[in-house]
């Protein structure tokens, strides 16, 4: 009996040892099995929020789980970005990433509670967000060439509005100044609304800004559109030339929306999210919604998004350094 008991105990021990150790989440099998949070680093109601909700709704349909938009605005996008960086790398917390949060903030701020490269894995681009150059209607210019000539003849007499130091439209205008050899004075505002109001009133003469808030003012004759910063004309304003067509060769000031997940998220989960995003952006109805907002729908591989980040960091870093732009 003792020998039999010992034999049975040894067999039981062997069975325990033979059991495979719990596997890490190394595949996308069963993912997702619960709601996904899509963290937007701006308050509800803006352009980023609109895109996140439209894309989130379609992702929810494809992935068969709710996608909840979680608005965590504040500190120029730092609060929401930090939250995602410190979240579990399990594919259930996504970051709605922007050029501002993932490239510009690291260039302007000496200390950040996250590393935009080390703490995140890129998933896919969502859209490019071109800007439009507009001027006050009383300014005696109707083309980009005429604006450049006017600015050169009147150094520091033109003012331009931005939504704050380091904002995309601040960097877009500083890029324009460098490429055209013009001297135009920066006037920062606390939002696009006040900035646009003062351009219309003539307190400042020009601004770059994303298309949606400008289109109605241009169509109403309150602002004059000179160019868009995309590589091709925007379907939302097909009559407005590109900067390239307007004579500013190789001008770049497109900013992007994208999806990131915390570092160490398993690759199969990233691949599944990437596939769902590509399917979402291939949907004609989704493309129409984004184009109507002045956006260029564009998906990518994770590597392509990572390469774009590196390229923009180098390109925008040069503008930030030469223009002496700092976060205030």
Image: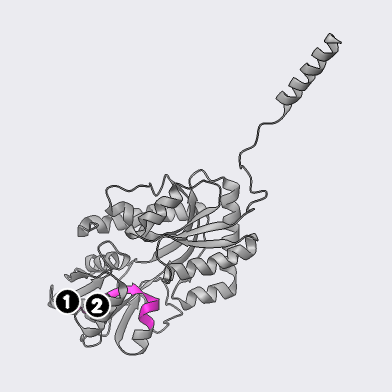
> Residue 105: x and y, percent?
32, 55
**Residue on which the image places disc 2:** 206
Q: Is residue 192 above or below residue 216?
A: above
> Residue 211: x and y, percent?
38, 76
Residues 128 and 203: in front is 203
Quadrant assignment, res 77: bottom left
Q: Is residue 327 above or below residue 141?
A: above
Q: CA distance from mark 1 to mark 2?
A: 8 Å
Q: Earlier in the sequence, mark 1 or mark 2?
A: 1
Q: Is residue 318 left or right of residue 74?
A: left
Badge count: 2
Q: Is residue 231 above or below residue 136?
A: above
Residues 284 and 77: in front is 77
The range drawn in magenta is 204-215
Q: Residue at the spot x=57%, y=46% of the render? A: 267
**Residue on which the image places disc 1:** 158
Q: Residue at the spot x=27%, y=85% of the render? A: 142
The answer to whether mark 1 and mark 2 are in CB contact below 8 A is yes
Q: Is residue 310 left or right of residue 56?
A: left
Q: Is residue 150 left or right of residue 170?
A: left
Q: Secondary structure at mark 1?
A: loop
Quadrant assignment, res 66: bottom right
Residue 74 appears in the picture as rendered: yes
Q: Was residue 209 drawn as part of the magenta stretch in this picture?
A: yes
Estimate how packed mark 2 is, as few (under 14), some (14 to 19) or many (20 or more) residues with alpha carbons within 10 Å. many
């Amino acid at each position: 009996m003792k020998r039999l008991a010992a034999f049975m105990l040894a067999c039981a021990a062997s069975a325990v040892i033979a059991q495979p150790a719990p596997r890490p989440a190394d595949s996308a099998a069963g993912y997702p099995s619960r709601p996904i949070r899509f963290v937007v680093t701006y308050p509800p109601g803006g352009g980023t929020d609109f895109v996140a909700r439209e894309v989130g709704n379609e992702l929810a349909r494809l992935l068969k789980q709710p996608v909840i938009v979680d608005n965590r605005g504040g500190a120029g996008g730092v609060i929401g970005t930090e939250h995602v960086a410190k979240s579990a790398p399990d594919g259930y917390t996504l970051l709605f990433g922007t050029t501002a949060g993932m490239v510009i903030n690291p260039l302007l701020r000496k200390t950040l509670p996250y590393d935009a490269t080390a703490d995140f894995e890129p998933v896919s681009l969502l859209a490019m967000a071109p800007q439009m150059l507009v001027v006050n209607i009383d300014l005696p210019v109707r083309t980009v060439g005429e604006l450049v000539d006017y600015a050169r003849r009147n150094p520091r007499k033109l003012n331009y509005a931005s939504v704050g130091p380091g904002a995309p439209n601040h960097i877009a205008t500083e890029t324009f100044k460098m490429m055209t050899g013009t001297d135009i004075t920066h006037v920062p505002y606390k939002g696009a609304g006040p900035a646009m109001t003062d351009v219309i009133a003539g307190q400042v003469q020009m601004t770059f800004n994303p298309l949606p808030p400008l289109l109605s003012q241009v169509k109403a004759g309150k602002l004059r559109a000179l160019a868009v910063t995309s590589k091709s004309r925007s379907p939302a304003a097909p009559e407005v030339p590109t900067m390239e067509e307007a004579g500013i060769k190789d001008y770049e000031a497109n900013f992007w929306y994208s999806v990131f997940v915390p570092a160490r998220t398993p690759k199969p989960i990233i691949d599944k999210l990437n596939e769902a995003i590509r399917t979402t952006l291939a949907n004609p109805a989704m493309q129409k919604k984004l184009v109507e907002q002045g956006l260029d729908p564009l998906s990518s591989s994770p590597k392509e998004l990572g390469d774009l980040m590196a390229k923009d960091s180098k390109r925008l870093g040069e503008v930030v350094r030469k223009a002496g732009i700092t976060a205030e």
